[in-house]
Each structure stands twice: as C-alpha cells, then as structure tokens.
Image (spheres, rainbow, N blue to C red):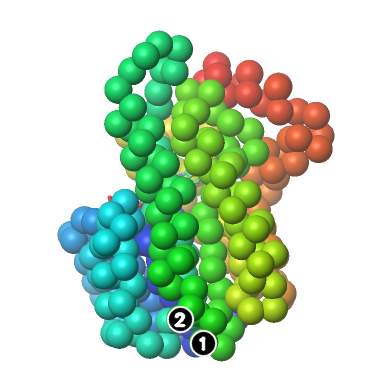
Amino acid sequence: MKLSGNTILITGGGSGIGRELARRWHDLGNTVIVAGRTRDAREETAQGYDNIHAMTLDVAQPGEVERFAKEVVERFPELNAVFNNAGIMKYEDITASRDLGDATAEVTINLLGPIRLTDALVDHLKTRDNPVIVNVTSGLAFVPQPKAATYSATKAALHSYTLSLRQQLKGSIEVIELVPPGVQTELTPGQSEREGYMPLDAYIEEVMTLFQQQPTPEEVCVEFVRPFRNAEKDGKVGEFMEMLANR
Ligand SMILES: NC(=O)c1ccc[n+]([C@@H]2O[C@H](COP(=O)([O-])OP(=O)(O)OC[C@H]3O[C@@H](n4cnc5c(N)ncnc54)[C@H](OP(=O)(O)O)[C@@H]3O)[C@@H](O)[C@H]2O)c1
C-alpha cells in the first residue's frame, strides 16, 4: 500500500483504532473518509483535520451499504482504499439457551459487513491505481476467547474470507489483514483502562511502522499479537485458551 496520495475509507472511524488510523493516514498526506453510525463520534474524528471527511454508515443494513457505496464514490471518485474496521464484541454465556440478538448482530456487523461493503466497492476499486482492501480481524481469530465465542468465530471467518479475497484479487487489488491484539479501546466497556491490553498509542505507532514496509506485509501483526497468530503452529492454542478463559 502506498503511504500518501490515497483516498481511504475507514469504517468505524469514529473511535478507537479506526479514529487513530484515520488521523495518522491523514497526516501522511491522504484523504480520509470515516464512516459509522454515531454522528458526534465521527465528526469528532474529523474536527481540526482538513482532509478527514465524516459520513453516515450502518454496515448492518444491506440497503444502507449500497446507498453509502454509491454516495462515497460520487463524492470521492478517487477512493482507492477501504479499511473494513467497524466491529462489535460481546461476551456471552453459551452453556444455556439464550437470546441470540448479540450473536446475530456480531455476525451481521463483523462478517457480513465487510463482505457487503467489499462487494459494493470492488468494481470501483478495480478502476483505481494502487487499490487496497484492509480487513481488521483479531488475535482471537487464531485463538478464540471462549467467553466471546461468536465474536471470535466472526474474526476467524473474516480471516478465512480475507485469504480467499487475496487469492482471487491477486494482481488486481492488494488485500491486507490487520490483526490487532487486545488494545485499550472501548470495544467492550472499561477495556480502555484494562491492564494486559496494549495502549492505543503504542499499538498505532507500531502498526504505522509496519505499513511503512514496502511491500506492505499481507498480515500486519504487531509483536504483542504474534504468539496468538502463531499459536496453532506452536501448539499453544489450548494453553492460551485456558489463559483467556480464566481472565
Ligand atoms: N480493541 C481491541 O482489543 C481489538 C482487538 C482485536 C480486534 N479489534 C477490532 O478492531 C476494530 C476496531 O475496534 P476498536 O477496538 O477500535 O473498538 P471501537 O472503538 O468500539 O470501534 C468500533 C467502531 O465500529 C463502529 N461500528 C460498530 N457497529 C457498526 C455498524 N453497524 N456500522 C458502522 N460502524 C459500526 C463503531 O461506531 P458506531 O457505533 O458509531 O457505528 C466504532 O467506531 C473492530 O473490528 C474490532 O473487532 C479490536
């Protein structure tokens, strides 16, 4: 991925990882569009940044994704990069029958969201120079957090989908997977102050250093997430799951 001169869409750019990525890519000389459901949040990301633009998007609504895709291409025909970053995470007890509302929302937002948005923009991206799709998965794609079973499953599925996307788009669109470890954001309530999670600033700093490598790594994995990424190869999945279950 080139470092400047891109027009980059970041879903979920109103907070956390998406917000900080938006600002860092902006400062490198890129046009950035942040999209999400909460107006105040996305406008706060853009405030004081000449070339960050805020737009409304709910990736859970198929019609809304199509409407948004048309509008973003009309307003920003140079759009060449899409970060599928929007996501939600819920803890759940799967040992007894329950309301599946949260699980359904996680699949709809975390998995179908990137599939739908990519579908709506892929034909446009192919017309641009240096097109790129960045899918944000998680270390939990590789070692599930048993207390967040559906979330972990959506990220494992998105990892798989990203592999297929990269293979099918070879030579046409660059496909990158961003694999965060636990990072101090409000993805779950109180997480931004929880110990054992990587501070957001340090995470973004290391991520941007990895993006400076040319060619960009297919998987952008900071050091902190590598043990999870490599757990299966290292025979550590069971051990790490035990650790997560007791957190
Ligand atoms: N922080 C971590 O520990 C961690 C670890 C691994 C992976 N990740 C992944 O990193 C990504 C960013 O998470 P984060 O930590 O930065 O948490 P965050 O601050 O909660 O950001 C998630 C963003 O997604 C947006 N979003 C949620 N549902 C949406 C929908 N239906 N349509 C459009 N936007 C939606 C939210 O904005 P609105 O509510 O305004 O729409 C929010 O800005 C997620 O995919 C997450 O799974 C995070």
Please count the marks in the image: 2
The residue at the point 54 percent across, 28 percent down is 145
Q: Are marks 2 and 1 in contact (CB under 8 Å)?
A: yes
Residue 181, x across and y down, in percent: 57, 43
Q: Is residue 237 above or below residue 173?
A: above
Dot 1: few (<14), some (14–19), or many (≥20) neighbours within 10 Å? Answer: some
- Quadrant hosting residue 126: bottom right
Closer to us: 160 or 49: 160
Which secondary structure, mark 1?
loop
The residue at the point 42 percent across, 41 percent down is 107
Name the kind of residue labelled 1 in the image.
Answer: Thr
- Quadrant hosting residue 86: bottom left
Instruction: State whether label 1 is within 8 Å of ligand 1.
Output: no
Name the kind of residue labelled 2 in the image.
Answer: His
- Quadrant hosting residue 47: bottom left
Query: What's the mark number on residue 34?
Result: none
Closer to us: 229 or 131: 131
Which secondary structure, mark 2?
helix
User: Which residue in the rendered view is the most extreme toward the right?
Assistant: 234
Q: CA distance from mark 2 to mark 1?
A: 5 Å
Query: What's the mark number on residue 124?
Result: 2
Dot 2: few (<14), some (14–19), or many (≥20) neighbours within 10 Å? Answer: some
User: In the displayed structure, does residue 201 sit left or right of residue 70?
Assistant: right
Q: Is residue 186 visible?
A: yes
Residue 148, x across and y down, in percent: 47, 28
Q: Is residue 3 above or below residue 62?
A: below
The residue at the point 41 percent across, 63 percent down is 117
The residue at the point 56 percent across, 44 percent down is 157
Query: What's the mark number on residue 127?
Result: 1
User: Which residue in the rendered view is the most extreme toward the top?
Assistant: 96
User: In the displayed structure, does residue 171 sit left or right of residue 199?
Assistant: right
Residue 197, x across and y down, in percent: 51, 38
